[in-house]
Amino acid sequence: MDNDVALEPIDDQGSRRVAFTCNGIRVIVMDSVSFALPADRGHVIVTGSHGGASAGEYAARILPLITVSSDAGFGKRDAGIRGMAALDAHDAAALCVSHASSRIGDGENLWAEGIISYANKTASALGFSIGTRLQDEIIAYLERRGA
């Protein structure tokens, strides 16, 4: 995907954008997980948020198919990914991308440039791998899922 291609806005403020659709499942990009809506359940959300406890709480209320955030450098006692790890309790897949590969707080940049640095147990069981390009992995997963 060309990094300069504008994503399709799906709200009046442009805070939520569709990056990709496959078999009825949308990849919705947003700068903060707080922009996620109940309608995102069953879709993929790519957020610029850190993957900490509060981000996991937001995602657990909605239960997207996959939640993506920044690892925020992991932090002390893995605080930067703690919320994504907690999503395993809901059988919800969660990934983090390396803060070194993309800009924290910029969902579009996570989608365009992110390299997976963390996959919770649920996401690992779906075949997601650390060190791979987020966009490629999400698209391949959605295509496999629809086949």
Image (tube, rainbow, N blue to C red):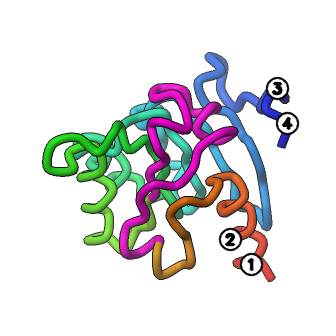
The amino acid type, in three-letter code, at marker 4 is Asp
| Image-quadrant location for residue 28 | top right
Magenta-span inclusion, residue 110: yes
The residue lying at 14 percent from left, 50 percent from top is 77
Say if mark 1 contacts mark 2, CB within 8 Å: yes
Q: Which mark is residue 4?
A: 3
Q: Position of residue 44 (x, y in %)?
A: 58, 55
Q: Which mark is residue 144?
A: 1
Say if mark 1 contacts mark 4, CB within 8 Å: no
Mark 1 or mark 4, earlier in chain: 4
Q: Is residue 34 above or below residue 97?
A: above
Mark 2 or mark 4, earlier in chain: 4
Give the SS element for disc 2: helix
Q: Is residue 122 above or below residue 64?
A: below
Q: Position of residue 41 (x, y in %)?
A: 51, 57
Give the SS element for disc 3: loop
